[in-house]
Image (cartoon, helix red, strand yellow):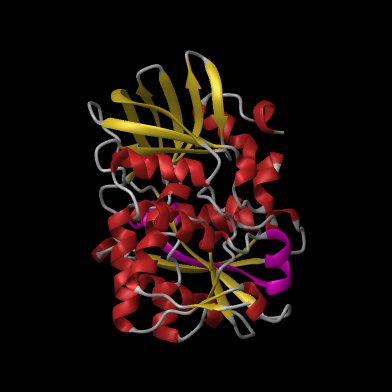
Amino acid sequence: MAIIEIDEKMMEAAVLGGAVLGGGGGGPIEEGLQLGRLALEVGHPQLFTIDEMNDDDWVVTVSAVGAPAAADQYVKPVHYIRALELLTDKLGHNISAMITNENGASTTVNGWFQSAVTGMPVLDAPCNGRAHPTGSMGSMNLSELESYVSVQGAAGGKGKRYTELCASGSVEHVSTLVRQASVEAGGMIAVARNPVQVSYVKENGCPGAISQAIRIGQAMQSHQGLQAVEAVASLLGGRLVDVGQVTEFELRTTGGFDVGFVKIGSLEMTFWNEYMTLEARGERIATFPDLIMTFDAESGLPLESARIGRGRNVAVIAVPRHNLILGATMRNRKLLQPIEEIVGKPILSYIL
């Protein structure tokens, strides 16, 4: 039981470790550092362990939704505050804390700016301990509760593309509306969604996953270049699969997602925001929700899928899913099934 004191070095570790657990998604490092520094400049973001809360306290998920590579995306800190306002205005009860939907370079620090401004704490208990593509994958299996009504506030965009909304309905339906809104807003939108009680987060979320990101980041801060990559792989019980030059890279932004293919030497990877499959000469090495992650081979810094390019020297790691802190949705066949249709590769037969 603790309130985790956040300083700039810990914030940077959270962003770096979050970038690793982003698995190719979760936003760029620069965005996470910018948001984290702003939170520390405007106030004192509070990160609580879940044991600091009562089981009947209400918690809301804060996140960004969209395609990281979208050229016209425009989400600023004020949009995160506005999304939270839209949600709380709709609800008939108080919200005691926030959680992020996932780990990622920018998503690990989701809520820190809102906490600094409002005083509302963020819990070390994201919906998922790694990044994932769809909103339903970050819903802690609320999509399986027929009686649950999802309430989601969203804001983002610039000028004539500015978009805000607050909608309620099934998790799947409202998540689709928000995804469509992200496209209208230029590719990305800030969201506050899915109020639940702490007891539900304990059972279906990922207590301790932010702390895991911080530990990964601290390992990176102590090393440079490939040594940093090896330190991360060792800490997570994974392995450095290979280091090589990107020879093929395809990316298309469609329906609010980045979808594509990467080839590095004998390795082939597919991604749907996050890396979904890793193969070597046709043999499957890792399959989402296993962690597949790329790093710049020179700097050792995590490199998300949207920033891969031909000719770049890249290191690739793979970490078995059982070494990660994962939410209940990562065992849900219905939510994982669409991956096969998007990337054109078998998924379920490798993991369930």
Side (left or right) of 155 relative to 41: right
**Magenta part of the protein: which range?**
180-204
Quick one: quadrant of the N terminus? bottom right
Q: Is residue 74 above or below residue 133?
A: below
Quick one: quadrant of the C terminus? top right
Q: Position of residue 8 (x, y in %)?
A: 33, 71
Q: Nearer the viewer, residue 113 or 210?
A: 210
- Magenta span contains residue 255: no
Q: Position of residue 156 (x, y in %)?
A: 35, 64
Task: Name the residue located 50 percent from the left edge and 83 percent from the top edge.
Answer: 120
Task: Name the residue located 29 percent from the left edge and 42 percent from the top edge.
Answer: 225
Q: Position of residue 259 (x, y in %)?
A: 42, 35
Side (left or right) of 315 relative to 23: left
Disc tally is 0
| Location of residue 92 (image quadrant) | bottom right
Task: Name the residue located 65 percent from the left edge and 46 percent from the top edge.
Answer: 330
Q: Position of residue 206 (x, y in %)?
A: 63, 59
Asked if residue 133 can be seen in this view, the reply is no
